[in-house]
Amino acid sequence: MDLEEQKKAVIEKLIREGYIKSKRVIDALLKVPREEFVPEHLKKYAYVDSPLDIGYGQTISAIHMVGMMSELLDLKPGMKVLEIGTGCGYHAAVTAEIVGEDGLVVSIERIPELAEKAEKTLRKLGYDNVIVIVGDGSLGYEPLAPYDRIYTTAAGPKIPEPLIKQLKDGGKLLMPVGRYLQKLVLAEKRGDEVIIKDCGAVAFVPLIGKEGFYD
Ligand code: SAM
């Protein structure tokens, strides 16, 4: 099978297994070329549904995780989304496909070399609705707040207070929480209330920063 056939096959499998169901998420996963975001020697494994090494001790997220997180966040066209942990930019590209030209993805990465490479790939593929910023995303990104949706692609000790502050009323935040035993947590802001839902066990790299681990 060539890469395009492998991509279709893995997405059909994710639909069958119930990870993804909405047309928006399915179309976005079909559109984004994951092979463009992985190192040259791993291109042939681009549609293996698992994290792959992208250097600097970091990984590209598994395809089912990107699809599942997009479904849980209920992303819609026109939304402004904050992503913490750009990595290689693949997940940002999937989000950018869903929010479309009227939406915006603000993505923060703490490792400058990864941010630079991700930005190059995103520009090459024409994702002009993604802004990549180098910094500590555990503090969010105040200048462009508030956001309709916020998600982190690294696991922190708790949901950082600045992220809740930077979320719009009615907005949703999704992040893995925990050091060794992690769970994916969905938070919905309703006025002064934050409603928390546990979305199951996951395994992510650590969120490193002031509101994360090891700062
Ligand atoms: N989003 C990526 C993708 O497209 O597959 C996966 C990202 S990888 C699993 C997690 C990323 O979070 C790493 O690149 C890591 O450097 C970054 N990270 C960890 N702590 C961070 C922080 N405080 N601010 C910004 N990025 C952070």
Image: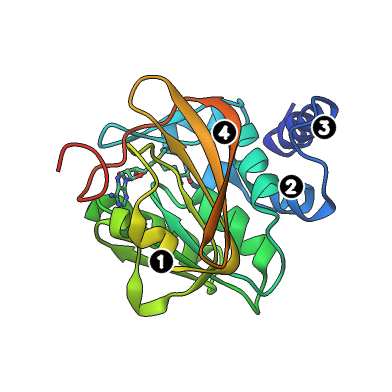
C-alpha span from label 1 to label 4: 36 Å
Identify the residue at image location x=60%, y=41%.
66
Residue 120 visible in the shown view = no
Report the mark closest to the observer, 2 or 1: 1
**Mark 4: secondary structure:** loop
Res. 165 mark: 1
Label 1 vs label 3: CA separation? 38 Å
Residue position marked by numbered label 4 in the rendering? 46
Q: Which residue is mark 3?
A: 12
* Residue 126, percent from left and from top: 56, 69
Horizontally, residue 171 falls left or right of residue 152, namely: right
Secondary element under disc 2, as helix, strand or loop, is helix
Amino acid carrying label 4: it is Ala
Q: Which residue is mark 2?
A: 30
Q: Earlier in the sequence, mark 1 or mark 4?
A: 4
Sequence-wise first label, 4 or 3: 3
Judge whether 7 appears above or below 103 on screen: above
The 10 Å Cα crowd at callout 2, few under 14, some 14 to 19, many 20 or more, is some
The residue type indicated by label 1 comes to Lys
Q: Is residue 197 above or below residue 125?
A: above
Dot 2 or dot 1: first in sequence order is 2
Q: Earlier in the sequence, mark 2 or mark 4?
A: 2
Q: Quadrant of the N terminus?
A: top right
Spatial CA distance of label 4 from label 3 is 16 Å
**What amino acid is at disc 2?**
Leu
